[in-house]
Image: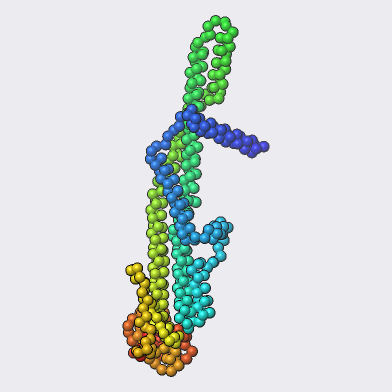
Amino acid sequence: MSIMDFNVKKLAADAGTFLSRAVQFTEEKLGQAEKTELDAHLENLLSKAECTKHWTEKIMKQTEVLLQPNPNARIEEFVYEKLDRKAPSRTNNQEVLGQYMIDAGNEFGPGTAYGNALIKCGETQKRIGMADRELIQTSAINFLTPLRNFIEGDYKTIAKEKKLLHNKRLDLDAAKTRLKKAKMAEAKAIQLNSTQPEGDNFMVNLSYMLNLLHVKWLKIWAEEVTKSEQELRITQSEFDRQAEITRLLLEGISSTHAHHLRCLNDFVEAQMTYYAQCYQYMLDLQKQLGSFPSAFVSNNNQPSATSMSNASVSSSTAVTTSLLPSTSNTIVTPTVSDLKESSGSRKARVLYDYDAANSSELSLLADEVITVYSIVGMDSDWLMGERGNQKGKVPITYLELLN
């Protein structure tokens, strides 16, 4: 029974406090009550925190869009995150395109120029897809997570203390209003007690009685001056304490900016690594594709070859046909097929630098001449190369067989 009485009393007290705040807030909006203004420093800190929260949310959401343009995938990842479960791994667009190219190249034939080029492009696209996956993972850990922690953690604490400060300010102003009304009621009561009504007129006596009742009602509603002053001191102390707590929290926004700056540097570094990887992958792919007109055309035993020049900055695009065989002067170029069939060796010029991936391969330098030959069962894209005492596999796309 005592617990129930306590809950009822607490509920009644909370309802009274809420009603008092609502009345004070309404009167302030209507211009019928005074409002305690916060000091300029605290106001600037509140504005800075709100501005930080606003732009942090925008940057975070747009970064998520940049890293994952598919809105359905973002929603799915959000749901899995809220359920505290790991989202299923999915292939990205580059990896899907790369696999299609590899499958098409294998279907057309790895020994053909187009088929081999598709395979090389597909492998590069898959490498770019893996680099993109690493960028997303690194950015999520080093950039998005700290921003999200601020929005869902630090700023929520700031918002909670800010709301408490607002309520304490309403309580303070409501106490000031009650004290003011109590003093007005006391002054009016003293005036009425010192002034007796003149005459025995019924209306005069009635007006006096109504005023007296009104004063007593005001004193009951506003309580006595002594109690109102004590309540004002308590609310002023609570307001000052809450203002100090809020100020200390808000001053931490500068540290938040410094932390987010470090996270931004990490994000930029992750992007720089990603774009550098993509550039290197495409540069290597371009070198490999650049050797196809001189190597693969002859490998496919085609009667003629056409060499296309790169697009110039000028308005025209030239296509050269200097490699087309003429009737008067035909240059017979040795082919890899001839080399494989003869089981002999031949000299070859290296077209591009090549770094060996493992100990079974041979590193190459552009324009050097090495000896190459075929081994039974070797992959069609490779030959054995020798340079002095060094020996290892070399890719045929990096070679030009010499007469």
Give coordinates of residue 215: x percent, y percent.
Answer: 54, 19
Task: Give me the residue at 38% from left, 49% from top.
Answer: 254
Front-most of residues 307 and 207:
307
Report which quarter residue 44 is drawn in. top left
User: Relative to residue 130, is residue 399 drawn left or right?
Assistant: left
Residue 78's place in the image compared with 168, above or below, is below
Residue 356 seen: no
Give coordinates of residue 328: x percent, y percent.
Answer: 35, 90
Front-most of residues 317 and 130:
317
Give coordinates of residue 175: x percent, y percent.
Answer: 49, 30
Report which quarter residue 307 is drawn in. bottom left
For this orientation, the residue located farthest to the right is 1
Residue 36's place in the image compared with 269, above or below, is above
Task: Give me the residue at 45% from left, 74% from top.
Answer: 121
Task: Give me the residue at 51% from left, 67% from top.
Answer: 92
User: Relative to residue 160, is residue 330 drawn left or right?
Assistant: left
Residue 242 seen: yes
Give coordinates of residue 62: x percent, y percent.
Answer: 46, 55
The colour scheme of the drawn protein is rainbow
Residue 170's place in the image compared with 84, above or below, is above
